[in-house]
Each structure stands twice: as C-alpha cells, then as structure tokens.
Image: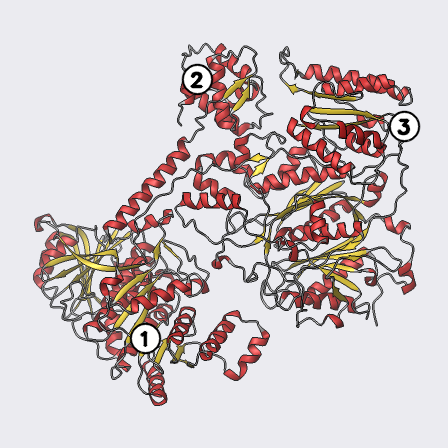
C-alpha cells in the first residue's frame, strides 16, 4: 500500500494553491539572486545559456594561464604545464576595492574567493531591493557552503612570493572569515557560518538557513557557495577518481565516465514567505521544505547510498507537506559517473515508489552538463537553476545526453531526462521541483521548491500628472556611466514595471554614493526618453529640465576648499534641509515641482534623503532592476620574474667512488671519552694491540663480545647473545658511564661467499639485525648526550672494481645506520668499508671526522661516495639486449603498479610468456567477469584489465602466489615454469613491501617483512636460475637507498643491498642491473600508500618511466637512479643534508637555488613600492616634506599611487594592522616612537603630518627622500 503524506485523497492534490497553505509560516521565499558562472557574468546570461543548451566548458583563459605560469616560473617549476578544460570564470583577478573601502594592497593580498563572494552578496541584496544600508544592524544570517582547497590556495602563493605581508593578509585568506567579512562590512547580527560537507555544502547551507529563519535565529538569510580552481593544472596524482577523461560531464549518458570541473560564485537572499509578501518583495520561488541525512555505512567512506538518498528525498517531501506526484522536475546531482548516476536514479525511484506507481512523469536535469561540477557550490547553482526555471515556466535541456546509461531503466522509473527546452506545464497544481546534492562526505540534501504565489498586482501608476524621482548613484564616474547604460538597455527590453515601483526600488533599495543622478519624471516612457537622451560621457553641466547631477567627496571637519568637498557638518545641514522639503512635497499631495526640484538638488549635493518617507501608505512593490556594475581593476599579487636557469643534470644518476686524501690526524691527537666496541669473539681484525691502544686513549672502553648467554665478565667487559634483550640489558647497565661512542665490528671478518639461504641469514644477523637490536635498545634506554656510531665492515660495495669479493649483505647494515642517524638527532653514524689491507690508524682517524657518512679503504687508499649525473651514451652494452619472441620472463610483484607497466612494455616488444609472482593471489580467471561487472575494487580491476590487454597482444600471462623470500616456494614455481616453457630468459624483481614506522617502534617481524622480499628474494632468484643463461636480471630498488628518510630504515637497508648485489652479479658474469626509482606519478608503492610523490625529485610519469627502463637496460651499468631533480623547490636543498658528496653540476645548481631563495627572502623583507606617490588636493600643489613623507608611506603600505592630502585613512581601506605598519615605518624614519593610535586619530595625511611637525622633531628636509629609499 502506498503512503499518503497529507492523509488526503488524490483529488486534493488538485486543490487551489492560492490558499493560506501557500503562505504557511514554514515556507521560505527566494527574493534575491546573483552570481557569476562560466560564460555568464550574471543570472540572466546564466539562464540564457541553460535554456539554449550552451556548453560552457573551455580552455583556461589566457590571462589566467599567464598568472599561473608567472607563479610556476617564480618557484622554478616547469612552466609548460597541461591545464584541464573546465567551466572557468574569466577574471578572478579583478575587484572593485574602492567600493568596499579596501586599499589596493589589501585587496591584492585577499583570496579571490573572498572578493568574489563579497561582490556577489552585494549584488544579491540589490537584486532583492535591499542594497545600501537597508539591512544595517539587522539579524541577517550568512550561510556559506565552502570547502578549502587541498591542492592550492592564494595564501600559499603569498607565503611563497611575499612572506613579509603575511600579517596583513591573514584575514583575507582564512576561509572561515569569508562569510564573516560580509557580516562585518554590512553590520549584520545574524548567524555567520561556513559549512563544509563537500559537494553538498551549499545546499546544506540552504537547509540550515531555512531552519534559522523558522526558529527566529535570523530575519533574513544570505546563502551562497563559491568554487575557484586557482591552478587548474592537469595533474593525475591530484585526481579524486571521479574525473571525466574529456573534462565533460555527460550525466545519465552511456558514454559518461566521470565529472568535469567548473567554477562559479552564487548567492540567494531568503526570507519567510509571509514576511516577503507583507514587505512587497519580488519573489523568484518558494522553498517548501528540505532535509539532510548521512549515508552511514556504504560500500566505502565516499561511496553513495541509494537508500539514504531515497530517505532524504522523502523527508523533504514530508517537511514540505506536499504529495510526491506534484513534483514534476528534479535538478539532479548528476555527476556523470558510471556508478553515481545509476545510484541517484535508484534513490529517486525508491522514494517515489513509496507513494506512486506512475512512470516517467518527472523531468530530470543537471547543470553539470553545461558548466561542470562546482563541488561545494554545485548545490546552490542547482537551486538557482530550479528557481529560474519556475519563474520562467521552462525546463532547460540537459546536454551531452545521447544514449541513456544502460544501467538505468528510465522506462521503469518515475523520471525522464529533459533533453530539449520544454514549457513547464502542470495538471492544475503549482509547479514544484526538487534539488539534489550529495556530498563526497556522505551528507545528502534535498530541497523542495515551488513557484512563487500569485499576489495582488499593484496598479502601475503612469499618470502623467504624478511626479516621481528616479535616482542612480555610484562611487565613480565610470561606474555611474555603466549603470546608466545598463538601466537604459534594461528598460528598452522589459515590459512596463510601473514607474512608481521602479522609483521606489531604485530610491529605497540601492545605496547612495558620491556620484549621483536624479531625474524627475511623470511616466515610464518619460523616464526611458530622458535616459536615452543622456550622453553618458558628459554627465555634467546642463543636463536638461528635471535632470540633476552632482558629485562630492567627504573630507574631515575642516573648511572645505575643493569644489566638491563635503564635511560631515555640511552633509548634515543638507540632510536636515531635505527633510523639510520632503514635508513640503508630501503636504502638496506630491504635486509640488519646486519642492521636488530642491530635493533633487540637495540629493545630488550629498544629502541623505529619507526616500522611504515619500512612499508611506503608497501601494508600491520591489521590482527587478540592474545591480551595481563594479568598477573592477586588477588586484593580484605582483610576482617578480625571478626564473633561475639551472644546468641540466638529466634523468639518470649514480653513485661513484672517488679517491680522497687520507685524513691527516696523528695518533697522539686521538682521544675518546667513553667508547663501546662490539666484536665477535673469534675476530682477528680487532686484535689485542688495537684494543690496547683504545684502552689508553679512552677514558672508559667497554668491550662487548658476541657469545652464548649474557655475562658481565668485569666492570668493562661483557659477553652477550646477538638478541634484542641482551643489547637492552647491556645498555641499561652502561647508562651511568656516559657512553659517547659505539664501534660495531661484527661483519669485519665476514669474508666468505654466501652458499645458502642459511648463510645469508647468518650474515644478516651479524650485521643488519645486530644493528637493528642495538638501535632499538639505544632508543629504549634513552642514553643522554650525543652518540657517535661507527659501523666497520668488509667490502660492502664495489669502490674500485678490483675487489675480489663483494658482500652486499654487509652494506644493508650501512643502509640502516644512515636512517638511525636521521631518526635520532642525538646519534651520528659513520660507515667505514675496508678490505684486507686496511690500516687501524686510518680507522682511528675516521673516528674524528664526520664530513663523509660512508668511506671505503682499498689497498690503503681512501674513497668517498659521490652522487653524480650519468650519460647513458657512455655506457652502452656491447651486445644489444633483446626481448625474445616467446621469451619467458619472471616479474615478481608483477601484478603491482610498476610491474604491470613493465609487463605491458615487454608484451609490446614481442609475444612473450610472463610469469607474475605476487604474495597476494589473483582471483581465478572464471571469476573475472563478475568482478568487472561489480566494479568495486579499482585496483583489482586495473590488474585484470592489464592482463587482458597484454594477452590481446598475443602474449601469455600466468599468475603465481608465493613468498619470494621462501626458497622452497620459489623453487617449485621456477621448476614448473621450466617444465611449462623451457628455460627462463629474464627476471624483473619488483617485489617489495612499503616501509612503515620508526625503527624504535618496529618489531622483528615487521622489519623482516620488508627485508625478506628484497634481500632473500633477490638472492633466491639468482640462485635458482644459475643454470639459465639470463639475458638480464633487473632489480627494482628505490631512491631511498641513497636518500632515505626517517621511517625507511628497513627499506633503505634492503634496497642498498640490491644496489651492491647487482655489482656482485656483474662481477660474476651475469647481466644484472638495479634501478633506483624515484616515485612514479600514476602508479607504484608511493601512489598506493598515498605518499607525497613530489619530493626532492619530480614524480615520474609512466611513459617516461618505461622509456627510462628501456634505455638503462641497454647499458652496462649495474646501478642507476632514474629521476629528475626538482630544483625549483626549496626541498632540493635537503640534498646537502645527506652525508654524501655531490657532483660539481649539482653543487652549482644548489648554489643558484640558495641565491634565488635569498633574493626572494630579501624581497619578502624589503619589497617596497618605489613608485613616487602623486600627492594632490591643493590648488597650488605645495606640500611640506612631512606631508610628502606621510603620503609616500601611506602609498606603499596601502598600495596607492595617487593620494589626496585630505584622504581618510579608513576610507582608503586602512585598519589597525595597517596603522601599526605605517606607525612602525614612520618611527624608523623620524627616530621617535609613533603609536598606531596616532595614525588612527590623525586620519588624513594633512592631520598626521601636522601632528608630527608639532612634535618638534627637528626633521631634515630630506624626509621624503628618506621615505622613498626606505628599506625595512
């Protein structure tokens, strides 16, 4: 049985809608609307674009692109970026700062979102007839739907470009102050809220505003939304996953694949309906009801929920008290995603089916197809579209709708897509519609709108015997001219509005400013004729009978000298006189032309005329008239052109070992206070002579041998097992000694080749795991003071190429040591790599030097690491490698992101046999079709699609699940592959586990989980393919092997092993290569773990990564880092923080970056406008040095190039913060403390200069010159 919301039969639906129910207390009227939209500067253009089906998606406007490039150039980043297409606003840089009494400087430091919303709200109030000071002191609420950007902000740009202005720009860049600025500017006393529920923000704001009006929190409510994409760079890593591939939203269409972006700012003025009727307001539409709810538990945090959407729609119907069958249109959320659209229609259908079985009676549309998704502002835009559709009784077409989405059975639903402009007809009941907005946050909102009620029309009074005054005013002559033109054009195309209504709205519903025009008329046609006769460029002098113009400038209470200067005292006198003349006019029955002439003359002279009193007891109403045409000028941060030309260091780097002079420290100078040495009991390297020397040179030498069980032999000698608990006990017992050095030597005697997994594990236990236990013990015992940690080991790396043996498991310990230092500021680590011919004296010298983090000694010579660029052309293979036809290639981690991309590359070169080996199991192939249909796991879907794509090329893919660090599991797989295909031709070892957490917080299990796939996995792969003549064994390492970060100890150790292991294999004759990858942009571990992919190095696009893979595979290098250094970021200077030598080119580029940052820093500290301020206001153009000095500083701080001697500080946009800045600058020039209160009290240049002169400062004649050349 269907529900009945109103408990009435269906005939009641047809009830007359002019009843009292139409103006129920809960109904809310929309009485004002304004906005800027893509390709539409106002709501009229917006409506025309909608009804004409205009696609407003475009390229980024050239001027905005130039601003983006200027900022990128300043930061030293790539300028030639690809920008998204979107629904863009044309001029977000322009603003009428004078109108809002802001200085140009403050305006340029204000987020354009603040500026756009400020102007839009003002125009909304004027559109409703509540402009000027009409709402001053009222309980008007501000409800803004806005979501601060995660990607970019104007404040960030200020921080980068002009850091010295952070103090004065704060208020203009804090999101929560966007609505507060409106309340401040208009002195509004109602609630001021910023609502962020993602895409539903602005419609939720409407809901909350309606609640506030009903409960009495506010009398009127301004509700708005704003969305700007400041830097719309096409960056795949910043995608939310819902974006359209062609930037176009195709709501409900089969070809839809996501949503396009848009920009805009919009606001509405809301008022209880019964009050709007009583106050003679013009009404666009009526909000009958609204509701919000939350998805709760759904497929995932951001997934939509059809049932929740149905519930919120039903709640809105109930709140509105209407029957669902009277809803004839729904403005849908309509994001154009394959999943979102069907879910939305499912929710709408579920809601309707609770009340009716009717099919396809309700139209459906979405503004997103025209202007893109405005995210947090999309709800208010949808509401405005619906209100305009109700007002115009037309349903605009949805565009880009050709073939219905096959997942939506429209014929079985209550809705149909409105795909052409359609008259909005109903069956005897009022036009009603719903508006959907569903947030990424899970917060849903639905609003019910109804057409405006039919209200008694006041007779248009066009009696030629009745006199009327029509006024226009602006804050500049150019704005006044624009407004006259707009009025003239408007009246020439609209039907007669009634001269009394026009004059009432213009006179009482607009502000009255310094440039004024008053016209006495007797009819609408008379008004049109007089406006048409006005020459906009000559609005001065004799304008004809009944036309008056005047302009004035408010100055302090002085004797007015300028022709148009007006003091407060004079203004009040004019106002008092106008009140008398109004009484005369009213007594005459509004027929006295003389009185009206005088009223007009007083008005244009600057009088505050009480226009409301003229319309007492008169039947007039507010009508739509043109709103204020802001005199916008560019207000944007001035970005200096400081592009730095860096030397090209390319995409490829490596570590080379370069000879370095041996440290010249005599043994007699060596002294260590309290040292601990950890050695194996059978060690022959650290002999008794060495220990005897150390005992003499140390205040205390703690000798620790690795044995069985824990034993304290004497005060300074211990035997411990190589386990974490024993290291913890050892350090606990040594806490009172004050250790400041620890020497780890357990791998010095590790000189045998690894013959088994057990051997490898034993060697790792002596070095890597021993250090792991030691570092955890150090963290737990909290030994105070700096600890120097020396790691001595044998032949960890290929330093000369002449090494007889390389021990890569030893270098893994060094990798961990480098991260221990980064995680613990009190620990300094040095890695010392020696061969059989090292001198103990050299080691003692290294104990005293920390210039290099890792050194090597070979045949008595000292070597240090250097990170340098590599020219691949110098390292070509003699014989070109081949991807063989039907070749067999193993890819560990093959179903991972980078592994999949490499697999696709291999299959593009030839028809190959690929074996993917992953820890996680791929689903059975017979289940793939169902998984694709469910479309839930994007990561799994990408793997399935990739495999299918590879096999379409004629290649074959077989997937295995195994732990690559398990010898038996891997042996079984490789044997099976040989039986299946024959020999193996190549291996790409890409298996890996992302690092997580500091060493002190890691368990041995989590540590080994990262180590195993890399170290044991690589060794096992090599061991099991000894009989295969591999064309290559490529191992994927990471930039972390060289530039590891805190939290990456295990990962750095494992990857550094791979780097050294490749050298060992090449020495044995196997073609092995380790690639130290930087983060990939679109795939890989960093993307999967949501890590920051742009660091010292730019993230690597997939195409570039595959090209690099192909190129390095054709070289004879055993190790190469692939990545482009991002010299444009300050972060690049972190390269100098690593204890590794940098090549000459790299050092030169870093010096350039430091100089660039220094120059920018100096700009932040001393940037000051050197343009001389043009001071005016005196006929003789004579000014004192003090006046010129004050004017110069005002101009610099406020951003003006022209000032009048009598300009008021606050009228120019000054505030307490700017007053402090001005006071500080003047104080430094005159060498005397000047308080900000002095600047505020003496609020004009002439007054402040006079005050300063009276201080008897003995100022010199060059004060102005000093001000011009002043630097902070």
Of badges 3 and 1, the one in the foreground is: 3
Horizontal side, residue 1263 vs residue 120: left or right: left
Up-down relation of residue 1055 to residue 1189 (above or below): below
Earlier sequence position, callout 2 versus callout 3: 3
Does any portion of residue 197 appear in the rendered image?
no
Residue carrying label 2? 1264
| Between 333 and 920, the one nearer to me in the picture | 333
| Quarter of the image where the N terminus is located | bottom right
Q: Which residue corresponds to the image point at 49% horizontal and 24% vertical from the top-left? A: 1222
Q: Secondary structure at mark 1?
A: helix
Earlier sequence position, callout 3 versus callout 1: 3
Residue carrying label 1? 1017
**Residue 836 % position (x, y):** 11, 66
- Tell me, yes or no, whether the two marked residues, 1 and 2, touch with CB atoms within 8 Å: no
Q: Secondary structure at mark 2?
A: helix
| Between 907 and 655, the one nearer to me in the picture | 907
User: Which labelled disc corresponds to residue 464?
Assistant: 3
Task: Give the CA distance from mark 3 to mark 1.
Answer: 99 Å
Horizontal side, residue 752 vs residue 454: left or right: left
Q: Which residue corresponds to the image point at 81% horizontal and 71% vertical from the top-left? A: 357
Q: Which residue corresponds to the image point at 57% horizontal and 34% vertical from the top-left? A: 633
| Quarter of the image where the C terminus is located | top left
């Amino acid at each position: 049985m269907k529900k009945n919301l109103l408990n009435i039969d269906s005939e009641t639906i047809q009830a007359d809608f002019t009843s009292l129910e139409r103006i129920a207390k809960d109904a809310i009227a929309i009485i004002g609307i304004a906005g800027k939209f893509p390709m539409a500067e106002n709501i009229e253009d917006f409506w025309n674009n909608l009804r004409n089906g205009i696609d407003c998606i475009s390229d980024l406007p050239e001027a905005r692109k130039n601003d983006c490039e200027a900022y990128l150039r300043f930061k030293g980043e790539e300028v030639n970026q690809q920008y998204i297409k979107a629904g863009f606003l044309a001029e977000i840089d322009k603003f009428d700062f004078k109108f809002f009494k802001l200085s140009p400087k403050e305006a340029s430091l204000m987020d354009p979102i603040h500026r756009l919303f400020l102007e839009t709200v003002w125009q909304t109030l004027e559109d409703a007839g509540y402009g000027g000071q009409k709402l001053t002191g009222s309980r008007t609420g501000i409800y803004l739907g806005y979501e601060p950007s995660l990607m970019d902000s104007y404040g960030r740009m200020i921080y980068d470009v002009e850091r010295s202005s952070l103090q004065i720009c704060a208020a203009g860049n804090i999101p929560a102050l966007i609505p507060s600025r409106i309340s401040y500017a208009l002195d509004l006393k109602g609630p001021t809220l910023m609502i962020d529920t993602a895409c539903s923000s602005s419609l939720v704001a409407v809901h909350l505003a309606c609640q506030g009006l009903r409960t009495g929190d506010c009398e009127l409510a301004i509700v708005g939304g704003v969305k700007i994409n400041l830097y719309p760079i096409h960056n795949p890593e910043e995608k939310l996953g819902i974006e359209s591939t062609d930037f176009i939203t195709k709501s409900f269409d089969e070809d839809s694949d996501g949503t396009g972006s848009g920009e805009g700012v919009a606001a509405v003025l809301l008022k209880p309906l019964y009050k709007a009727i009583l106050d003679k307001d013009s009404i666009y539409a009526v909000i009958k009801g609204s509701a919000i709810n939350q998805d709760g538990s759904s497929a995932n945090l951001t997934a939509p929920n059809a049932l929740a959407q149905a519930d919120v729609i039903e709640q809105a119907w109930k709140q509105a008290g209407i029957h669902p069958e009277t809803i004839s249109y729904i403005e849908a959320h309509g994001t154009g995603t394959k999943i979102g659209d069907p879910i939305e229609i499912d929710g709408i259908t579920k809601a309707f089916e609770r009340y009716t079985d009717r099919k396809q009676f309700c139209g459906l549309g979405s503004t997103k197809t025209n202007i893109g998704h405005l995210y947090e502002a999309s709800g208010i835009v949808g509401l405005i579209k619906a209100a305009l559709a109700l007002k115009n009784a037309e349903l605009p077409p949805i565009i880009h709708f050709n073939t219905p989405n096959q997942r939506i059975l429209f014929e079985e639903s209550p809705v149909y897509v409105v795909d052409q402009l359609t008259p909005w007809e109903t069956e005897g009941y009022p036009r009603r519609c719903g508006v959907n907005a569903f947030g990424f946050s899970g917060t849903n909102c639905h609003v019910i709108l109804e057409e405006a009620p039919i209200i008694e029309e006041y007779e248009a009074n066009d009696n030629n015997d009745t006199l009327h005054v029509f006024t226009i005013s602006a804050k500049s002559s150019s704005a006044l001219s624009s407004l006259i033109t707009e009025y003239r054009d408007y009246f020439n195309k609209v039907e007669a509005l009634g001269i009394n209504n026009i004059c009432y709205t213009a006179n009482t519903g607009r502000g009255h400013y310094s440039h004024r025009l008053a016209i006495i008329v007797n009819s609408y046609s008379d008004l049109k004729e007089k406006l048409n006769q006005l020459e906009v460029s000559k609005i001065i002098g004799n304008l004809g009978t009944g036309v008056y113009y005047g302009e004035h400038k408010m100055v302090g209470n002085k004797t007015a000298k300028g022709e148009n200067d007006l003091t407060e005292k004079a203004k009040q006198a004019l106002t008092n006189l106008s009140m008398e003349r109004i009484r005369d006019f009213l007594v005459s029955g509004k027929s006295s032309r003389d009185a009206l002439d005088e009223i007009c003359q007083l008005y244009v002279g600057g009088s505050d005329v009480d226009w409301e009193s003229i319309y007492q007891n008169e039947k007039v109403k507010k009508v739509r008239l043109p709103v204020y045409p802001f005199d916008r000028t560019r207000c944007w941060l001035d970005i200096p052109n400081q592009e730095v030309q860096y030397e090209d260091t390319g995409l490829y780097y490596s570590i080379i070992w370069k000879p370095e002079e041996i440290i010249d420290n005599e043994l007699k100078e060596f002294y260590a206070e309290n040292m601990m040495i950890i050695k194996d009991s059978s060690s022959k390297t650290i002999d008794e002579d060495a220990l005897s020397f150390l005992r003499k040179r140390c205040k205390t030498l703690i000798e620790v041998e690795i044995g069985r069980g824990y034993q304290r032999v004497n005060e300074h000698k211990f035997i411990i097992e190589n386990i974490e608990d024993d290291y913890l006990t050892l350090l606990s017992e040594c806490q009172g000694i004050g250790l400041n050095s620890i020497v780890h030597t357990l791998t010095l005697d590790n000189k045998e080749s690894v013959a088994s997994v057990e051997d490898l594990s034993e060697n790792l236990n002596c070095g890597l795991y021993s250090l792991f236990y030691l570092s955890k013990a150090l963290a737990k015992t909290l030994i105070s003071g700096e600890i120097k940690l020396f790691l001595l080991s044998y032949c960890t790396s290929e330093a000369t190429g002449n090494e007889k043996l390389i021990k890569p498991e030893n270098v893994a310990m060094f990798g961990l040591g480098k991260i221990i230092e980064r995680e613990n500021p009190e620990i300094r680590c040095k890695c010392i790599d020696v061969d059989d011919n090292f001198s103990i004296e050299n080691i003692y010298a290294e104990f005293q030097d920390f210039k290099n983090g890792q050194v090597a000694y070979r045949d008595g010579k000292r070597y240090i690491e250097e990170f340098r660029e590599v020219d691949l052309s110098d390292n070509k293979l003699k014989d070109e490698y081949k991807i063989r036809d039907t070749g067999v290639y193993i890819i560990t981690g093959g179903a991972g992101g980078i592994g999949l991309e490499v697999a696709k590359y291999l299959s593009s070169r030839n028809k190959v046999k690929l074996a993917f080996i992953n820890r996680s199991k791929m689903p059975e192939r017979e289940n793939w079709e169902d998984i694709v249909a469910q479309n839930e796991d994007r990561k799994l879907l990408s793997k399935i699609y990739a495999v299918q794509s590879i096999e379409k090329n004629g290649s074959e893919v077989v997937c295995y699940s195994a732990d690559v660090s398990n010898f038996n599991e891997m042996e079984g797989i490789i044997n099976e592959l040989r039986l299946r295909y024959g020999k193996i031709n190549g291996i790409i070892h890409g298996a890996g586990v992302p690092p997580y957490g500091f060493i002190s917080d890691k368990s041995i299990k989590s540590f080994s989980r990262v180590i195993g796939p890399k170290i044991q996995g690589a060794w096992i792969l090599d061991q099991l393919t000894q009989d295969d003549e591999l064309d290559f064994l490529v191992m994927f390492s990471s930039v972390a092997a060289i530039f590891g970060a805190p939290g990456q100890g295990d990962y750095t150790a494992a990857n550094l092993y791979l780097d050294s292991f490749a050298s060992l294999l090449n020495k044995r004759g196997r073609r092995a290569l380790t690639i130290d990858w930087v983060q990939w942009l679109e795939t890989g571990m960093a993307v999967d773990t949501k890590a920051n992919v742009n660091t010292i190095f730019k993230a690597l696009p997939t195409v570039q990564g595959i090209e690099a893979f192909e190129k390095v595979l054709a070289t004879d290098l055993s190790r190469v880092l692939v990545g482009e250094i991002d010299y444009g970021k300050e972060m690049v200077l972190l390269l100098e923080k690593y204890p590794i030598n940098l090549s000459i080119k790299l050092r030169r580029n870093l010096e350039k970056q430091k100089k660039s940052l220094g120059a920018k820093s100096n700009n932040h500290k001393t940037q000051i406008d050197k343009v001389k301020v043009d001071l005016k206001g005196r006929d003789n153009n004579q000014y004192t040095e003090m006046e010129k000095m004050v004017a110069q500083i005002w101009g610099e701080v406020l951003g003006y190039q022209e000032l009048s001697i009598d300009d008021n500080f606050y009228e120019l946009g000054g505030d307490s913060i700017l007053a402090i800045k001005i006071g500080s600058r003047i104080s430094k020039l005159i060498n005397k403390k000047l308080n900000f209160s002095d600047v505020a009290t003496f609020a004009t240049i002439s007054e402040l200069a006079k005050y300063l002169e009276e201080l008897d400062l003995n100022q010199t004649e060059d004060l102005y010159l000093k001000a011009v050349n002043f630097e902070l």
